[in-house]
Amino acid sequence: MTLHHRTCNLCEANCGLLIETEGSIITSIRGDEADPLSEGYLCPKAFALKDLYEDPERLRAPLIREGGQWREVGWQEAVAAAAAGLHALQQRGGKSAVASYVGNPSAHNLPAMTALAPWLRLLGGSNRYSASSVDQFPKMLACYLLYGAQLSVPVPDVDRSDYMLILGANPVVSHGSLMTAPGMKRRLARLRKRGGKLLVIDPRRSETAAAADEHLFIRPGTDALFLAAVINAVASEGFIDASALERVEGVEHLLDSLSPFTAEAVEGATEIGASQTRRIAKEFATAASSVCYSRIGVCVQSYGTLVSYLSDALNIVCGRLDRPGGAMFSSPAVTYSSKGSYQRWKSRVRGLDEFGGELPIAVLAEEIETSGQGQVRGLFTMAGNPVLSAPNGARLEKAIAGLDFMVSVDPWMNETTCYADVILPPRHSLENPHYSIVFHKLAVRNTAKFCKPVFEPVAHALSEWEILGQLCAELSRLRNEDAVAAGAEEIADPTAPHFAMSPEMFVSMLLGAGPSGLTMDDLLEHPSGIDLGELESGGLDRAVFHDDGRVHLSHSQIDAELARLLGEFESGQVGGVGFAAPRDDSEFLMIGRRSLRSNNSWMHNCPSLMSGRDRCTLLMHPVDAGRLGLEDGRTVAVGSRAGKVEVRLEISDEVMEGVVSLPHGFGHGRPGTRLSVAAQRPGVSMNDLTDDAVTEGLVGNGILTGVPVRVSACAGAGS
């Protein structure tokens, strides 16, 4: 029996694990109480590491499609075929003829995280996409505008806060999104035990709302109105903390812009009373410490960037930025920064803006479908399943099926990779070393931890680092052949110096450049991790990248969004959803939801997670169900402009009236996939209802909450 110290890399929580193995068998997984960040906590997903490692349907050798059939091949043949197909498309149509899509598991994987940048730079082109444009870019753009860098993301100092206001987030289930906080339920319980208050604003009484001191329902899509009114009330009641604004530009401009949004004016739209809004403003501003935290639920609406900006603005004007108990910046042992970019180019068809070197995934289908110069005819995907994750997934699936060539680096044949011509499956993450480059930077406590592989790599299995390194070498070779044939000088592989290192060497290099003074030997001597202490004031000095060293509240883009919000509000609708006129009984606003036993679309083939009750149901309030004469357990039809699905109804008062909730990530059992466990409980895809034609105002991500739908009984359908 061998004991291994490990960090769970299945979500952002970074829980420390103790994994016992006997040979190649995992015999137990438990929480590591010595881990300074997670303190022994783990969730059900940790046990799924065994399922994922042992899954007989996990691909273990490269595959090439020939005549509609898959053929297992060696790595040399597979890499050569992948590079040749991508190269041929770029020769004919230019570099942008090949698009790329990277899913979020890549950020949890050290070899993938350290290999992606050189590969994507070499591949080139403007058609880069990722899961970040599904739900994250509005928050990152708000940080780009406020602090001058898209990765300058402040996190709630939840362990010392006296008052936490949460909008559009469910950290009891997610353990923090853009906030690494394992065991969040315990952390929030400690906040309340020390006399603090937890307030959740959400259209659903989520698991976090159920654990809060107070929960208020809000009409989906109106969070910008609510936060504008809260800041307005803070100002009108004289609660602005002028002592904290020395390094802040544009405060008066912001307050003037928010003057029309009083608590009394917006209460009819938000369905939160004016007296409640003013009370919350006073509680937040006068608490010994407080922090506002908002995430996915506010990002995936029409005003996602504006809401994210206003969340930070509330922290800023109340003096809660860079102060204990407020919104603070971590001090990770491994430091990195990306100022990012915005509006350097636009998508070819619709003209949506670039952000961070990427375009929003909502435009990929039209970029494939629309002929002309720059049309996408090839696709590279890595650890992603946009058919289930992107808005209007049915349209995107049809577009992907019609591509000329596609390469996927993925260990499963899912709803997207089943359309690939070449699949290059990486070895399991337990066969790789691990260091959480991204999530230490977003953690609520400063720690550092390096994990050795649990298992020796299986013979002939390659990591993402090795796969992408070989792809870079082969694509560079093909380009060099073309250059020489055309009479030009030879072209060297620009990525060769990078891939001459290893992921471990890369981490060592970053440690040496970091502020902690730690070395790889130090980390190896402390397999449970090293505690670097609580978040410290002064992080703003590292986080602000504006030339004047100040936080910027004044931006033309924010002004434009506030003007759009005011115009829509005065016309009786926000983000395309009306609130002034009565609605038809069959009309609802659809929101998503998370499950602790799920993680987007890629863990539904785990038997340990898929056991128990059906989790892909449509939640509806009892009053609404009564109006429509619908019974619990009945199959109902849910339709939108984009599509229609049939799903089992679950009647519950945890959603507000007029709102229905469908979980994200389901829709399995489609032809061509190899996910037999998932296919037994396929569920339906929420993104067969979301609309790729309607996007967020500034970064163009899809609208996944407050989606107008109609619900009706299915003819002849029973429970």
Image (cartoon, rainbow, N blue to C red):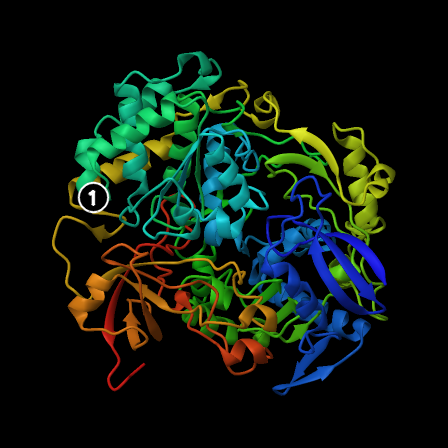
Give the percent coordinates (x, y) of residue 544: 56, 25
The residue located at (85%, 50%) in the rendering is 500
Q: Quadrant of the N terminus?
A: bottom right
Which amino acid type is shown beneath numbered disc 1? Answer: Ala
Q: At x 51% / y 80%, what residue is drawn?
A: 680
Q: Tell me where residue 281 appears, x and y as whole percent.
A: 31, 27
Label 1 sits on a secondary structure element that is helix
Q: Is residue 299 above or below residue 663?
A: above
Q: Nearer the viewer, residue 483 or 702?
A: 702
Q: Which residue is mark 1?
A: 269
Q: Is residue 160 visible?
A: yes
Please tell me which residue lies in front, 516 or 529.
Answer: 529
Residue beneath the point at 47% across and 13% down: 246
Taking 58 as reference, is 459 left or right? Answer: right
The quarter of the picture where residue 178 lies is: top right
Q: Is residue 447 left or right of residue 343?
A: right
Q: Residues within 10 Å of mark 1 (few under 14, many from 20)?
A: many
Residue lying furthest front: 193
Image position of 110 (left or right of 167):
right
| Residue 349, image quadrant | bottom left
**Whole-percent x and y of residue 668?**
50, 75
> Left or right of 158: which side holds 86?
right
Coordinates of residue 56 in the picture (x, y in percent):
69, 78
Nearest the viewer among 93 and 523 is 523
Q: Could you tell me if residue 486 is visible in this image? A: no
